Image (spheres, rainbow, N blue to C red):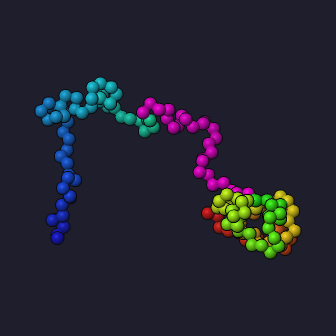
């Protein structure tokens, strides 16, 4: 096979529609534009935000402030709950927090410093508050920072 022998598959090439060439052509009269109305006139162009008479998205959104629905939200865990649920020398990971029911997904876990911790634990999380980090290390524990997803 040579380059000059390559042809498109049958049915892929269509004859160009020639409008306004008389009634016998099948595209005469109104030239496929229908009768009257905006789209039948010359010079008509649809605006980029036209939604068929529905209120356009730009006008449906509030003028000030807009919260994106898919915004990544941090899942928060307090030290008081870690103290209550886990034992001494436990390795606490986001997967374990999901299993216990402290967080829903474990995708973006932040540990906060509310409450008291006396147990020596190793906590793996995506972020820590300064107070939480200080309290865990003061109790003899360890904080491991995970990369954010």
Q: Which residues are magenta?
A: 52-76
Q: Position of residue 30 (x, y in %)?
A: 22, 29
Residue at figure coordinates x 27%, y 26% from the top left:
35
Residue at figure coordinates x 69%, y 64% from the top left:
99
Q: Is residue 107 left or right of residue 37?
A: right
Q: Position of residue 69 (x, y in %)?
A: 60, 47
Q: Is residue 135 left or right of residue 39?
A: right
- Report the front residue among 30 and 10: 10
Residue at figure coordinates x 59%, y 51% from the top left:
70
Q: Is residue 75 magenta?
A: yes
* Count of numbered circles on the image: 0
Q: Position of residue 23 (x, y in %)?
A: 14, 30
In the depicted structure, whether residue 58 falls above or below residue 15: above
In the depicted structure, whether residue 13 falls above or below residue 23: below
- Quadrant of res 40: top left
In the depicted structure, whether residue 118 falls above or below residue 42: below
Q: Is residue 14 left or right of residue 64?
A: left
- Quadrant of res 88: bottom right
Give the overall secondary structure of the magenta segment. Answer: loop
Quadrant of the image containing the N terminus: bottom left
- Report the front residue among 40 and 100: 100
Quadrant of the image containing the C terminus: bottom right
Q: Position of residue 38 (x, y in %)?
A: 34, 28
């Amino acid at each position: 096979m040579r380059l000059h022998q390559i042809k498109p598959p049958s049915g892929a090439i269509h004859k160009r529609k020639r409008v306004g060439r008389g009634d016998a052509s099948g595209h005469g009269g109104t030239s496929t534009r229908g009768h009257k109305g905006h789209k039948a006139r010359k010079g008509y162009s649809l605006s980029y935000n036209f939604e068929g008479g529905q209120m356009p998205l730009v006008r449906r959104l509030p003028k000030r402030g807009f919260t994106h629905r898919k915004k990544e939200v941090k899942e928060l865990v307090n030290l008081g709950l870690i103290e209550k649920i886990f034992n001494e020398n436990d390795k606490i990971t986001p997967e374990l927090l999901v299993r216990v029911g402290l967080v829903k997904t474990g995708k973006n876990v932040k540990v906060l410093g509310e409450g008291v911790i006396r147990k020596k634990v190793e906590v793996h999380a995506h972020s820590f508050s300064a107070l939480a980090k200080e309290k865990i290390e003061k109790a003899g524990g360890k904080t491991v920072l995970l990369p954010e997803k």
